[in-house]
Every structure is written in structure tokens, then in C-alpha cells.
Image (cartoon, rainbow, N blue to C red):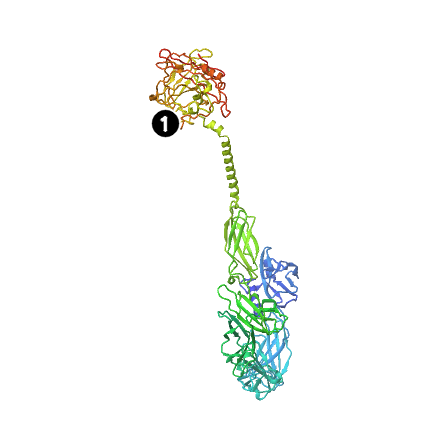
Amino acid sequence: MFTLQTWIVQALFIFLTTESIGELIVPCAHIHPESSVVQLGSNFTAVCVLKEKCMNDYHVTANEIFWKTGRVTVPYEQYAVINRTASSVTFPNITLINALLTCNIRMFGQINRSVYGIRIISGLPPEKPKNLSCIVNEGKKMMCQWDPGRETHLETNYTLKSEWATEKFDDCKAKRDTPTSCTVDYPPVYFVNIEVWVEAENALGKVASDHINFDPIDKVKLNPPHILSVNSSKELSSILKLTWTDSRFKSFITLKYDIQYRTKDASTWNQVPPEDTSSTRSSFTVQDLKPFTEYVFRIRCMKEDGKGYWSDWSEEASGITYEDRPSKAPSFWYKIEPSHAHGTRSVQLKWKTLPPFEANGKILDYEVTLTKWKSHSQNYTVKDTKLTVNLTNDRYVATLTARNLVGKSDASVLTIPAWDFQATHPVTNLKAFPKDNVLWVEWTAPDESVNRYILEWCVLSDKSPCIPEWQQEDGTVHRTYLRGNLVEKKCYLITVTPVYDDGPGSPEHIKAYLKQAAPSKGPTVRTKKVGKNEAVLEWDHLPIDAQNGFIRNYTIFYRTVIGNEIAVNVDSSHTEYTLSSLTSDTLYMVRMAAYTDEGGKDGPEFTFTTPKFAQGEIEAIVVPVCLAFLLTTLLGVLFCFNKRDLIKKHIWPNVPDPSKSHIAQWSPHTPPRHFNSKDQMYPDGNFTDVSVVEIEANDKKPFPDDLKSLDLFKKEKVNTEGHSSGIGGSSCMSSSRPSISSSDENESAQNTSSTVQYSTVVHSGYRHQVPSVQVFSRSESTQPLLDSEERPEDLQLVDNVDGSDGILPRQRYFKQNCSQHETSPDISHFERSQQVSSVNEEDFVRLKQQQISDHISQPYGSGKMKMFQEVPAVDAFGPGIEGQVERFETVGMEAAVDEGMPKSYLPQTVRRGGYMPQ
């Protein structure tokens, strides 16, 4: 094969590197050696020799030769120029397995051309085959196998050779797919020795294995026995008998056997001692088996002397041992159920079915005996595994036996204590943990002697009640595993109860998982209270079905819309947590995760917004402001109340009430002695006429220094609503008011205070009777009087002043007290604010001198001018009753005049007040 490849490569390069001139194709060069198979790790040298013709045609020498392995140029350091026609290349410690080596020239200094090539195949010579062995399968030909040794990387042939001492057998050549074994073509000849060896050969060498010499009978592998039956014995419940058939070699060689057995549900095999089966036989009885138990058997055989090979295992066969009485008493326990009857209790007795290896047969029924303390017994036969009886509150002893076809088991005894029994002495250091896919429970035994332990467990679930399973352990056990169908991710409540002679002890509880996992869902968080800078979060514990393990801790993740997420770990026992240092008026996103030992699960995300103001912050602002406003208002009201007179003076001017004017108590015809603080001059206080005259200075007419002429009335009669002062005034107090203007230029710039208002109060008699005395009184008020209402029907002549015949014309007046009935004698129309307590005669005389003189101003039309003069009344009257100084406005009064000569007063301006007669 390698020679063929070499010739193909050489032919290809000859074709590529030859020139045709109409003659035979001649190569330009050739390489020595032609053989291309070399040993790995050896040095290899190749020589390229150029032909003269090519050298002359292409103008090249050995100096222009360069070498390539594939497409890679060999380094020039490995070249050696031998002469002008030959160049060599050397590969030290060659590692090329299969590579193309070419000789190349550079023509005309720039064109590269391959002129010859060979393929280098490197490998290793074969090693000596080892571990040559042969086997003769019953009914088949001999097969030998060996260990070829290292890989040669070359095509290596293996040949199995065999011969007798006098005869050689045909060679057995190994196939390419199974170079380590070969099966001879001739049948084996027993009891004659044969010599066998292996030869290995490749391009780099040839080697043979060691020779082995053996009798083919010592290399035999027999066919397995065939099991006929497995039988039990009624006499002995612990034995089974096997029978089988052997190989045909049994007739001329001695055999030995290997028998194994196991229970049906077991995975490991038990073996019968080899010395019990070292001779040829066709049956065997297996002993020390468990009663009423199914066993599985298998068997194999070989040559007794141990030469040769074990046969394959026979097909498995099974059998069941005979029954025996139960070997152990059943596990026995009780449960007291609620009972409504007084003095009795419902007790459920329960027990476990014996496993087959303890039942030793089919259990037919159970016998239960209940014995009341120091009393008679009651027997029950039950086929079920529980019995419910009604017992009194006394102490009972219960026994239980299981019965099969052969007999009864030992009795299991249980003490049911009285109803007032107090359980004590529990186990301590109770632990539960998973291991090897079972749930182990261990505890520390009490100091007292314990008969047995009862282990109860149930699955805790929110969807179903806790239905307990239980098992019983001996009193010497302090560690066991729960023998039940436990599932992963379920929480088990485990209870361990010690049982003593006088009754059960106190139970101890613990929770455990066979295998934990991450929770099925995360907790749902919500806000309990949200403040400005904090929020109280609360959540519910995960349902037990969703926990899948013990919750070790909670983690709260919260963040704002643009902020980083913050994580807070919370103990698993908590159900609320307060987030602090929050920003007011901000939206927060919160989620919560619950973690077990195997991982965690996130709950749904929840959002809340912190308020802009804290609770009570608005009230803290509003309440003080309101209180301040209320306090300010209250202080303002109190201030206004205390300063009401001042405020009234500036806002509501004090309009004088004519009915309270003291002019009613003053008259130039009445001596001062008539005034008395105790007696009013006019008890009825009925003043009927009030007239107001305005005198204005006229600056257009010349006047004397102290006296200015008065103009005639310039103001026409008008309605008084527009002239009312507003305080104390009403429509019933209004009347037309004539006025006299003065045009004095020097006083024209004065304000309205320069206009002096006067009032005349005239007392009239009852029903046109002439009063004996006229009284004039000056008003206290400095404010303008109210307008008078003209009453034409009341105009009449009154009595003559000072006994003269002159008649006083009736003046315009204010109608007083229009809200009261005019004929009421008890209510005065004018209410005097103060009476003068005492007046001396000098004051009265002085007032008399200030009466109206007979001087009458020139008439204006048909009317008469009335002139008055302002006089202060402090000098005229003494202090009043309340100690106040009464001030009276000067009142001008019309004097009674005859038709020929009317009388009048001309007002005078006096610094100290009063009238000066003219």
C-alpha cells in the first residue's frame, strides 16, 4: 500500500517537472532514498539530484534548490549543498506522521518550480504481544486474544499461530476491526496439549509473542445449568430446595457450583458457602431462610479443579417459604376522641400491620383484650387495624395479638391512664433532619426507663387537616427514620412520645422537611401607615403550602422611579417593618422576597406615595394661625369696646338730640333760682318748636370789626333727609331749614365749623294755652341740629314776652319723639341729659342781659331776619349733678314784636361766649 502511494506521488511529480521534446518524458531530478517510511523520533536525510539538461535549460544549480513539507518551506539551516547538482535536507527527531516532501528550484531568480517529491510516512515498529489467552466455549471453536501493545501509526498485521508437537495448524489472521483476537477454524481436540503464539509485523519490523502450551479441556467455559424447581417444606419454614440440570461435560469432568439468593424486593445477593457446593450434583437445599418469604435464586458451574471459566448465570427462579407464627408483637397505640357523655370517653385503639418478614404468614385476625384496673376483662376479635370503644374514666390495660394459620404472636401491652393522669418526663434535644433521601429523627432519652417510643407525623397544610401517621420504636432506640411515603417541599409536624409502664409521657414536637425548595410565591406587601418621611409596611406570613421550606428571612426592595434599589433584610418572625428616611411627595415601588435554605421568591410589586405634609403638620400651621386670628379679633373687639366713644366720635358723629338740650331749662325771663336739680321746670318735657338757622359771613358787604351784617335767608326750604347727621336722626326729625349766609371774604376759607348753628326751643302750652314762662336753654352739642319739620297747623301766637302785646310767630320746628304717642303723659318727648343743680343770681342776671333786643333787622321780603350770637354758657351755669360742666349753645330767640316795631337780636362775636344786647 505504501509502495503504491510512493509510486503515484513520484509519477505525479515526474509529470509536473518534465519537458517534452517529442521524446520520452524525463524527470528533471530525483530524490534519494525512495523509501518514505521512517521511524518516529529518528533523523531523516533526503538528497535531491538535478539532471544536466534541466540545469542547462533553466540555468540553475544546486544552490537554487529549496525544500517544502506540504506548503511550508523547510528552514535553510537544514539544507546542505553537496555539489553543483545535489542538495540535501535533514530532519532531526522527526515528528511528521504523514507529510509530502518536495524538491523545488528557483528559475531565472524569480520563478519557483517543484521538480520532484516523495511522501514521508513515519511510525513505530510493533511491540511484542502480551497476555495471550485462549477459551473454548462449550459447543464452539477455540478463540484466543492478546494485548497488542502501543499504537504503531502504521499498518500492522497480527497472525495467530498454533501447532501440535507433530502438526501445524493453519494460521489465523486477525481482522482489521478486531486486531486483538482471532478464532481458529478447526474444532478443539481435548486432552491433547497445543502450542499457541502471535506474530505482529509492519513496515518497520516484525515481532512474536511468548508461546503458551495447554490442554483445550482446561480452557473450557461450560453452558449454565437450568433450574427446574424451588420447593418449600411444611416441616421447616426456613428452607427451600433447588433442582437443576447440568452440562453434558458432567459425564467426563467433575463440576462445582455457585448458588446465590435474595428476597424478592432486595437488590443484593446472598451466596451459599462454596464448600457446600464443590461437588457434582443436581439439587441443593438452602437453609436459614425467613418464613413465608419469597426468594429468588440463580446458579452457575465450572470445572472442579478451577481450571477454565465459570459459566454464565442461569435464569432466575423464585420460591416462597412456608408460614410460621408471627415473630413480633404488633405496634399498638391509642387515641382519645371527644365524648359528650359524662363519665365516659371514646378511645380508638389502633395498630400496625406486621410486615411479611415478621408476620411469617397471612394474618387472619387480631385479638384485643381490655382489662379495667382491678376488674373484669373484655375480649374483641378484629380483622381491621383499629377498634373504637367507650371506656369510663378509670385506668385500663389493653393487650393485642396477631394470629395466622400457624399460631399467635406475642402480646403487645398498652396502658390507658385515667382521665386525670398527668403526663411527664418528655424526651429532650429532639431533632429532625433529612439524610439519604429519608427524614431522620433523634432525641435524648429520659432518665426513666422507657418501654417504647411512639413517633407521629403529619403534613401541615392550609387546605387539609393534619392526618397523622405513626410508628413504634423500641425503648432502647434514640435515633430512627420515618418509615412512610414522605414527599418533598412538605412541612411535617413530628411528635415523639415516650411510653412508660403507667402510661405515656409528655409529647415533644418539631417541624421538618424531607427536602426544601424556594417558595412558590412571594409575600404581598402593603402599607399600614404612610408618613411624610416614613412608611409602615405590613404583610402576612406565606401559607404553609407555598413556603416549601423554612422561611429564614424576608428582603424588602424599594426604590423611586429614578433612584437605585435599596434592599433591607427582615427577620422571618416579623410581619411589619418601617421604612425611614423617605422623601416626601414621592412615588415608591416596593416588592418583597421570602427566602428558604434553597432560594427565594419575589412577591408582586406595590407602589405608594408619601404625603407632602406630615400628619398634624397642616393642623400645626392652621391652628396657630386661626388662634392668632381669633386672638387678634378678640383683642380688636376688646379695644373697640374700650374705645367705643372715640370710635363712635370718628365714625358715627354724635348728633344732638333736641329733647335732651339744656336750652329747655334756660330762659332770660326765668330767674336762675327756678332751676333745681331735683325739680324739672317742665315735668312733661314737651318741647314742640325747634328751628335751626345757619349764618354765613358775607365778604361782599362792609361790616364793622366786631359786627357783620347778615344777609337775608339765602337757602330755601328743603327736605331734611339730606341734612340729617345720621346719628339719632330719622325722617320724623326732619324739616326745612332756612339759613342766613355771610359773605365775609376773610372767613370764606374756613371749613364748615365756621358755620354756627343755633336752635330755638319754645315751650308751648297744652292745647293752645299760653305758658307763663318761656325758657331758653343752650344745647350741649357742637354738632348741627336736625332739620325741622314744618307743622303749619301748629303755627299760632304764643304769650307775649315780658307782658308785651307782641305776638311771637310760630317757628319751624323738629317734631320730637315721633315714635311715641303724642298724648302720652308719662313719656317726655325730650329727655334731658342733665339738669343744672344751682344757678346764682348773677348768672341769671347776666343771661337776662343777653336777651334779644328790640332791634330788628331790615325786612327781607315778608319775612324777618333772625340773628343770633354764640355765647359760652360755662359762666352762666354751674356744674351739673354728675359733676360735668354743662355747655350751652347760644340760642337766638325771636322776641315778641308789635306790628309796628318787631324786636330782634343781632349776633355778636364774643371771645368768651354769650350774647351782648344791641
Q: Amino acid at mark 1?
A: Thr
The answer to whether residue 315 shows anywhere in this view is no
Question: Which of the two residues, 229 or 225, is positioned nearer the viewer here?
Answer: 229
- The quadrant the C terminus occupies is top left
**Count of all numbered marks drawn on residues in the image:** 1
Q: Is residue 840 left or right of residue 856?
A: right
- On screen, 615 above or below 524? above
Pointer 1 residue: 823
Give x and y (percent) for residue 332: 55, 75
The structure residue drawn at horizontal position 51% and vertical position 41%, both measured from the top left corner, is: 623
- On screen, 844 above or below 580? above
Question: Which of the two residues, 109 or 722, is positioned nearer the viewer here?
Answer: 722
Q: Answer with the quarter of the image where residue 37 lies.
A: bottom right
Q: Looking at this rendering, what residue extends furthest in the left direction?
A: 793
Question: Which of the two residues, 465 or 887, is positioned nearer the viewer here?
Answer: 887
- Mark 1 secondary-structure assignment: loop
- On screen, 303 above or below 397? below
10 Å crowding of disc 1: few (<14), some (14-19), many (20+): few
Give x and y (percent) for residue 913: 48, 17
Question: Which of the two residues, 478 or 778, is positioned nearer the viewer here?
Answer: 778
The answer to whether residue 555 shows anywhere in this view is yes
Give x and y (percent) for residue 35: 61, 68
Q: Looking at this rendering, what residue extends furthest in the bottom direction?
A: 251
Q: Answer with the quarter of the image where residue 26 lies.
A: bottom right
- The quadrant the N terminus occupies is bottom right
Give x and y (percent) for residue 218: 61, 84
